[in-house]
Every structure is written in C-alpha cells, then in structure tokens.
C-alpha cells in the first residue's frame, strides 16, 4: 500500500540513549545482580530485539517489511484541535497526534508489528503476552495474524470482565485469551488460592505469560507492550512523524504531553523532541501524565524492582510502587502498572521531563469535552493526556500566553464506552 510523496513516516527508529548526559542504569539479572547480557534475554526475546533492548546506535533501520505494514496506517494524523481551543477560549494552539486510526485503535500496533516481525524472522512459532485493557493484546493478535504466528494472551481479569469486545477482537484475529489470574500457571494458581475473586494486575499477568514461555521449551517467546527499551524505541515513529509534520506546518510545540502507563506512547512522542533539545536545537517541556491511583513516576521510589508480581523478570531501575502493588480497578486499565519505563524514569531523575498525576473523574470530564469538540472519543488512558493538555491551555487563558501544546491521543475509546456510561451515571470515584 503506498502513500503520497509527503509521507513523513521515518525509515529508522530513534534511540535516545546515546544522546543522554548519563547512561540509563542497566537491567540486572535477578540471580547474579549483574547487568543482563543478550544470552540472558535469549529465552524470552529473539536476538535482534535483545540487542535493541541493550542499546546500540542512535538510529535503528526499520525493516522494509515492517515499514510496509506501517504504511497501511501511517503516517498518523497530527491535528490542530481548533474547536477545542474555541470551546476553552484559550490563546494556546492545541495539537494532538492521533494513534487510534489503525485497526486495533491504539499506538500499540507500532511495536507489535516490529516484535512479531523479528520473532518470525528468528523462526519462533508463537508469542505469549499479557494485556491490561486489551489494546496490546489486540495489537499483538493482529500482528501475529499478519506474520502468521500463534498468539496467547493473559488478560487481566478486571478488563476481561469489563471489556468482552476486546477479547472478541483478539479472538477474531486468532489469539487464545485467558483471564488472569488463571489456573494455567503456578503464579496464577497461587493468586487464586490467596483470593479466589482476585481482579488481577498487569504484573501478575506478566508472571503468567513468562512462566508459560518457559514451559513452551523454546518454540514460543514473550512479548511486552510497554516499559522495555525496545518497545519505546519502536514507538519513536510517533514523535519523528510529528517533528516532520510540525516542520511542514511551520509550528513547534512548547509542551509535549502523553499519558504514561509504562511510558511507551509518552516516550514515543516525546523522545524525538527531547532529542532536538539534547542536540541544542529547540527546548521543549515534556510532561508524563499518570493516574492519581497508580502514581509510579510522581509517588513511587526510584529503585531496582521486578517487572512482574511473582519476581521472575530481570530487575529494572525504575519508578515503582513495588511489584506487589495491585492498583485499584480504574477504567484506564492500560495505566494500571506498578512500574515505569527505565528510560522515562531516568529522564525524570535527570530533570529532562516532568510528571503529573490526575484523578479519574477529571480525566473523563476532559475526555467528554474533547469528544464534543473534536469528535474522537479518547481511550480512558488517553483522557489523562487530554486533561493535562486542557489544564495547560486553561493556564494560557489565565496568563494570556499563546503556547503550542501537543499531546498523544494514544487511542480511541470505542471499546470503553462502559467507562463513559459509568462516568455519566456518576459511578466513577477517585
Ligand atoms: C497501553 C496504553 C497506554 C499506556 O501505555 P504506555 O506504554 O504508557 O503508552 C496509553 N494509552 C493507550 C490507548 C494504551 O493502549
């Protein structure tokens, strides 16, 4: 599928790590506490993804087959939210980069396609993963269908119950979906023994997926939709496209905003702009927005922790609420994770990014205002970015400043309308 000549989809991903003033603390082996090697990662990931995880050059060429798949739905539009600006009576220029236009409705497909491609190229036959709200599971389900891989998904129980159509979408693409905690793994059985009504967590679903991969004896590998360095690398297509789009329209953002669960859509949009700043070209404020009920960046400690609740993954230095933390069952399932991307966490420590936490009801209010002005119903996760962008724009109304604000509209909320119904009925709490 070809797009027109002005196609700004980049042909390389951008790795911010070589540009940082201090190195990102390495991932550690849980047993030896030494930095992990490519060999340590080999049971979980194919060699190319392990190499990307450990880091290399600033630019990583996007394989042609992945570019072809990207071009089915990229470039993603950068839209000036003029009707929202008028509704807010703000002098600010508000833009959003809309990642909900692909068939699975969120930015997750950007990394799902890359991960499925590298696994297929390495001879892997199936991928096992977890999903919170279901966006990642749907994206990997479609990527596995395109690349002819088996796909197995452990879906956090609360979302499995709240969002049956997400499960239906994954099954439509051919994925096998289990509610987590499940009886299929020791980690799941232990959680069910402790609490038969356990609603689950991303951390626990990761434990189940990793355990399942170990049991598959090499045929299947593991895929993660956020947090990891290679995931954030793949998502930089978002920000690189946005840079090109801003250049074309002759504007540039003062503030870049993204909802942060594990940090991938925020990092994907913000890193290329931060790269411009680090190269001494244009300064930018980058703001990560998280839910007040799961505030890893704003309230968590910065320390080594496990990525999963059972404590089986490598240790990552990150802002964490502790791997035993089960976040409350808020509707933004994709933001219910105890940790944060090690790169995003490191940037926060370096003072290169800011973080704010916002309560769920204020997010839905902003999401509804956005939908009425612009038409797109944001995913509950994305409403966090909308809220912060609206607050920046309202501050501009007070100060009279005309800042340019861009936020990642990471996905649409068409599978999340129950959340909106609950909001309208006054059933959401903070
Ligand atoms: C998964 C998801 C998020 C949160 O994950 P990040 O890795 O922080 O981007 C945010 N928005 C949407 C629509 C998602 O699907």
Image: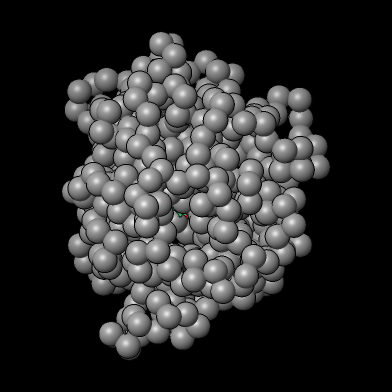
Residue 347 position by quadrant: top left
Task: Name above or below for residue 166 compared with residue 230.
Answer: below
Q: Quadrant of the N terminus?
A: top right
- Residue occupying image coordinates x 51% and y 56%: 224
The answer to whether one can see residue 142 in this image is yes
* Residue 395 % position (x, y): 22, 31
Evaluate whether residue 245 shows in this view.
no
Q: Tell me if 81 is positioned left or right of 315 in this view.
A: right
Looking at the picture, how far across and down is residue 334, in whole percent? 41, 58
Instruction: Return the residue found at the far top.
Output: 280
Q: Nearer the viewer, residue 92 or 164?
A: 164
- Asked where in the image residue 390 lies, by quadrant, the reply is top left
Q: Nearer the viewer, residue 149 or 265?
A: 149
Residue at figure coordinates x 63%, y 46% from the top left = 47
Q: Nearer the viewer, residue 389 or 271?
A: 271
Kindly give the residue lying farthest to the front in the view shown.
Answer: 32
Q: Is residue 390 above or below residue 294?
A: above
Residue 300: give x, y in percent of width and height. 21, 50
Residue at 41% from the left image edge and 14% from the top image edge? 282
Indicate the position of residue 338 as horizontal and vertical percent values: 30, 58
Residue 291 to residue 280: above or below:
below
């Amino acid at each position: 599928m070809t797009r027109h000549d002005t196609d700004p989809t980049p042909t390389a991903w951008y790795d911010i790590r070589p540009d940082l003033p201090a190195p990102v603390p390495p991932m550690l082996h849980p047993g030896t506490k030494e930095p992990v090697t490519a060999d340590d990662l080999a049971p979980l990931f194919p060699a190319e993804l392990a190499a990307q995880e450990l880091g290399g050059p600033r630019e990583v060429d996007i394989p042609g087959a992945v570019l072809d798949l990207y071009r089915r739905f990229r470039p993603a539009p950068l839209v000036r939210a003029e009707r929202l600006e008028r509704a807010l009576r703000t002098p600010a220029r508000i833009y959003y980069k809309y990642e909900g236009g692909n068939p699975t409705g969120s930015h997750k497909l950007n990394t799902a396609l890359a991960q499925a491609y590298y696994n297929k190229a390495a001879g892997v036959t199936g991928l096992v993963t977890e999903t919170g709200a279901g966006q990642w599971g749907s994206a990997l389900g479609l990527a596995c269908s395109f690349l002819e891989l088996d796909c197995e998904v452990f879906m956090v129980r609360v979302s499995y119950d709240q969002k049956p159509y997400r499960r239906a979408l994954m099954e439509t693409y051919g994925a096998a979906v289990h509610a987590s905690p499940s009886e299929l793994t020791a980690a799941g059985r232990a959680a069910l023994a402790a609490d038969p009504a356990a609603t689950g967590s991303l951390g626990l679903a990761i434990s189940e997926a990793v355990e399942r991969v170990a049991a598959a004896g090499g045929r299947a590998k593991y895929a993660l939709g956020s947090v990891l360095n290679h995931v954030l690398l793949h998502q930089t297509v978002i920000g690189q496209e946005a840079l090109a789009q801003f250049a074309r329209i002759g504007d540039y953002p003062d503030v870049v905003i993204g909802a942060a669960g594990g940090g991938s859509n925020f990092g994907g949009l913000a890193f290329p702009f931060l790269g411009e700043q680090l190269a001494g070209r244009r300064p930018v404020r980058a703001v990560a927005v998280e839910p007040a009920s799961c505030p890893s960046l704003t309230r968590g400690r910065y320390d080594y922790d496990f990525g999963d609740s059972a404590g089986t993954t490598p240790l990552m230095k990150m802002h964490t609420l502790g791997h035993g933390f089960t976040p409350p069952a808020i509707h933004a399932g994709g933001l219910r994770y105890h940790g944060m991307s090690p790169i995003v966490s490191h940037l926060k420590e370096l003072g290169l990014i800011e973080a704010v936490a916002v309560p769920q009801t204020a997010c839905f209010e902003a999401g509804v205002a956005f939908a009425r002005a612009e038409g797109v119903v944001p995913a509950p996760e994305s409403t966090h970015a909308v809220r912060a962008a609206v607050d920046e724009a309202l501050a501009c109304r007070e100060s009279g400043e005309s800042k340019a604000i861009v936020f990642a509209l990471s996905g649409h909320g068409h599978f999340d309308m129950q959340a909106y119904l609950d909001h309208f009925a006054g059933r959401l709490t903070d």
